[in-house]
Image (cartoon, rainbow, N blue to C red):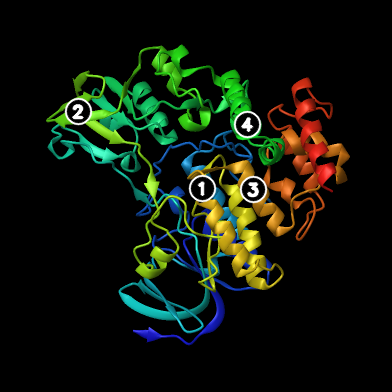
Amino acid sequence: MTLHTPDTRIAIIGAGPSGLVTARWLLEAGLTPVIFEAASALGGHWNSAGPHSATWPGMRTNTSRVMSAFSDLDHAPGTAVYPRQDQMLDYLHAYAGRFGLMPHLRLASPVVSMTQAEGGWLLRSTCGGVESVEHFGRVIIASGRHSKPVVPQVLGLDSFSGFLGSAHTAAYAGPARFAGASVLVAGCSISALEIATDLALGGAASVTVAMRKQRYVLPKLIAGVPTDHVMFNRAAALAGEILPPEALAAGLKSAVLGASGHPAQFGAAAPDDNIFAAGISQSQGFLPAVAEGRITTRPWIDRIEGSRVHFTDGHSATFDAVLFGTGFRRDLPWLAPAVTKALALDVPVADLYAESFHPDHDGLAFVGMYDLVGPYLPVLELQARWVAQVFAGSAVLPTTTEQRAAILAARAAPPALPMHALAVQFARLAGVEPTVARWPDLERALLFGPLSPASFRLEGPAALPDAAQRSVDAAGAFGRIIRPDYDPDEQGLRNLVLGSQAAAA
């Protein structure tokens, strides 16, 4: 065992998108990242060979290539509108190469324990059978929110005798294994609906989806435009700050129904009338597959007896396989239990100021440990920029009292946060949220175009000279925003949100 002396480096745990973008911005701030990665290669979930990956070769993203990138590196020409797993992994390798991150990586070096020590943290890691203990004054945990698959308790699950068994969808590796089989997919998450569709079109004899509750379902494309370009924008974020919940719910429901229709129209169950209570999922092919009879929907599972599954509506059927698309939770078994408990890291909404810091644990930060609705990478970068500013001393955290008040208020927040709200929050903290009034030629693109990474390089620290043109290009990439003049529906919301900003100024 080797004991290293304390130094001023910053440890990052995880070399997926969160860890890589954090390391890039620490370097920008003049700091030195040391990135611990359990797998033998970078990429996090996008490294399908990694021990904690829930991806498989050929898997597609559910966010567009514009919104599946960071601000200073676009995807390679020819990348699909919805990139494949291998394209995302290639992108992350290119990003690490461009910003000189490879020398800072410690691959195949899992952290086995992390405890508080005087002046910082002790990290115990292993590499090639050799154990090391190192002291770091500051540590950033960027190992991912979706690390531990959750399988709910179902009466009789242990007795399931279908010849393909039961598993979480994290273990799914494509439809070939299920050719000719009858498959039950449990859950209404994006992965559950996408995998059910993949199975239905990929040779399964029958596919049934069981849900605790039916969600509203957005397609991946709306009239040829990626859904994340339509649904996640600044106007929506700003409206969320001034409109009452009832108006927000009504507006969101109207937009979703206009984009995808009502699930009952396709033969699925009717979701709760309140869209916030029902929730939203996403799949391009699920509802059409239900309408075509390729997928049958049922309510939740009552019990399992051998290969027969009984549902709460009284129906039953036999299945060869059961797949649970029932989500993930944080899993930090190497973190000191007292810290895990103090920060409520074992519940959906952790006790963290702005999802990043806790007033009682100096030198500790988190990046990307939240459940997000919408594209992750632009939000991860904004959070990483702010965390790097804090650790570099160019941004100052609120007082301990103010942090505690914010943490208390956040406990009432839903466990899944909308991308546009969190992006704007981090952008303001980092001082990079563009002031719409300063960019009159970009006004419509900034309000109703996608929250593209380039739009957060218009002003503030690390502004880019080509950010304006790249923001225009992103807004018009799929024909969404190609003119500066507003549509009638946009004009009313534009007046509301900009009028509110003017009044507050």
Residue that carries the numbered disc 4 in the rendered image: 248
Q: Is residue 336 visible?
A: no
Residue that carries the numbered disc 1 in the rendered image: 412
Q: CA distance from mark 2 to mark 4?
A: 43 Å
Mark toward the start of the polypeptide (1 vs 2): 2
Secondary element under disc 2, as helix, strand or loop, is loop
Q: Are marks 1 and 2 in contact (CB under 8 Å)?
A: no
Q: Quadrant of residue 400?
A: bottom right
Q: Which mark is residue 320?
A: 2
Secondary element under disc 1, as helix, strand or loop, is loop
* Residue 325, image x, y percentages: 35, 37
Q: Which mark is residue 423?
A: 3
Apparent side of residue 48 relative to residue 445 in the rendered image (left or right): left
Apparent side of residue 429 relative to residue 205 in the rendered image (left or right): right
Secondary element under disc 3, as helix, strand or loop, is helix
Mark toward the start of the polypeptide (2 vs 4): 4
Residue visible at 57% across and 34% down in the picture: 80
Residue visible at 34% across and 54% down in the picture: 51
Q: CA distance from mark 3 to mark 1?
A: 19 Å
* Residue 460, image x, y percentages: 78, 57
Q: Which mark lies nearer to you, 1 or 2? A: 1
Q: CA distance from mark 3 to mark 4?
A: 18 Å
Looking at the rendering, in which quadrant would you find the N terminus? bottom left
Q: Are marks 2 and 3 in contact (CB under 8 Å)?
A: no
Mark toward the start of the polypeptide (3 vs 1): 1
Badge 4 crowding class, 10 Å Cα cut-off, few under 14, some 14 to 19, many 20 or more, is: some
